[in-house]
Image (cartoon, rainbow, N blue to C red):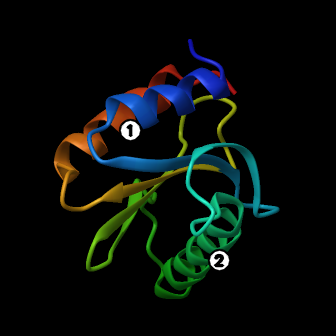
Amino acid sequence: MANTETALKEALTSIEGATGVALVDYTSGMALGTMGGSKSFDLNVAAAGNTDVIRAKMRTMEMLGLKGDIEDILISLSDQYHLIRLLKSRGGNGLFLYLALDSNRANLAMARHQLKKIEEDLEV
């Protein structure tokens, strides 16, 4: 089991192309931990904004009567991937991992696989 800081460090160092990672509470929009990012890419702002993405998707699923769970949400930009993974592990209800990737260096399938493994090992 990994604590938050260890899990974030593992995501940033082991996932090819990762530029920033955060553990976020989507009930409040607050980042519980961040690693990476830059002066021009504030992970706390990204955490709050992506909370709105999750809430909108959940509302849409409810209106459509969809009963499945969200595993992850992918936003692809011209030079970045933004991967949002809702935590299903014990104690992870209401939390998500947010990962920003350089699309020129990242392997999206491997990033999803590694983020899922990090989630399984995360102790919240």
Determine whether 52 is above or below 64 in the image: above
Position of the N terminus by quadrant: top right
What residue is at 57 percent from the left and 66 percent from the top? 41
When asked about the image quadrant of residue 123, the answer is top right
Classed neighbour count for the residue bearing mark 2: other residues with Cα under 10 Å, few (<14), some (14–19), many (≥20): some
- Mark 2, secondary structure of its residue: helix
Amino acid tagged 2: Asp
Per the model, the C-alpha gap separating discs 1 and 2 is: 21 Å
What residue is at 30 percent from the left and 58 percent from the top? 102
Amino acid tagged 1: Leu
Please name whichever residue, 96 or 33, is drawn nearer the observer in this view of the structure. 33
Position of the C terminus by quadrant: top right
Q: Which percent across, then down, holds residue 32?
A: 76, 44
Q: Earlier in the sequence, mark 1 or mark 2?
A: 2
Q: Which percent across, then down, holds residue 70?
A: 44, 60
Check disc 1 and report the residue beneath it: 115
Determine whether 53 is above or below 105 in the image: below
Check disc 2 and report the residue beneath it: 52
